[in-house]
Amino acid sequence: AQKVTQAQTEISVVEKEDVTLDCVYETRDTTYYLFWYKQPPSGELVFLIRRNSFDEQNEISGRYSWNFQKSTSSFNFTITASQVVDSAVYFCALRQVNDYKLSFGAGTTVTVRA
Amino acid sequence: GAVVSQHPSWVICKSGTSVKIECRSLDFQATTMFWYRQFPKQSLMLMATSNEGSKATYEQGVEKDKFLINHASLTLSTLTVTSAHPEDSSFYICSVLSSGSPDTQYFGPGTRLTVL
């Protein structure tokens, strides 16, 4: 069984603050994929990143960075110098290597105030 | 540009009627598409996996006779909500597996269904 937990329901920050979104997962598989998606108010999910379980290198893309720690089953996401356009619901997701079905966390609503 | 489109983007219907939602892959052929449902302020729940040329695979608890899925071509899957009731009101989202990068799902913009 797979499970993704996003303990933070809502986070509110002021523009230019950094914000970190937590994601903890459970899986019996030794290899798997982890994802982050952004869902802005328009509703369309936007793919942000995919991480293979065997690659624990952290990744940075512009103001976004991800910290993957297999030892603690966590895949946290940080937005640096947040902007109002970052306001959205962010979902962490997990899937097995041989099964394309995604298991989503509950999502974290990020509100960035000007 | 958009990779996946959905039509309509929103629909309001009377209880008891049927509603068809289309999901189109715009940039590539998709042998596999997924249908999700999202209630307000909740996460996405997978309803079914749509396979081109074969029957869809439904998740546990999803009524296959109520949510009819047809994947007739490599670029189109349809979800028909039959005899809709107010509790079927939700945000329906499809996703497509890219043939070139099958590890990533691309999501459509969603269809908001309101059943009166």
Image (cartoon, coloured by chain):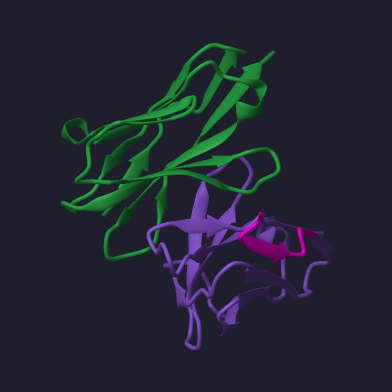
A53 inside magenta stretch: no
**Is residue A87 among what the camera can see?**
no
Name the quarter where the C terminus of chain A is drawn.
Answer: top right
Q: A2 or B15, which is in the foreground? A: A2
Image height of B81 relative to A69, above or below: below
- The percent coordinates of residue B104 (x first, y second) are 43, 57
- Along the horizontal axis of the image, is A54 left or right of B90? left
The image quadrant of residue A29 is bottom left
Chain A in the picture: what colour? Answer: green
Tell me which segment is drawn in magenta: B1-10
Name the quarter where the N terminus of chain A is drawn.
Answer: bottom left
Residue found at x 62% / y 13%: A15
The image quadrant of residue A22 is top left
Image height of B26 relative to A69, above or below: below
Image height of B47 relative to A46, above or below: below
**Is residue A57 among what the camera can see?**
yes
Residue found at x 70% / y 70%: B21
**Chain painted purple:** B
The image quadrant of residue B81 is bottom right
Q: B87 or B111, which is in the foreground? A: B111
- The percent coordinates of residue A14 (x first, y second) are 61, 11
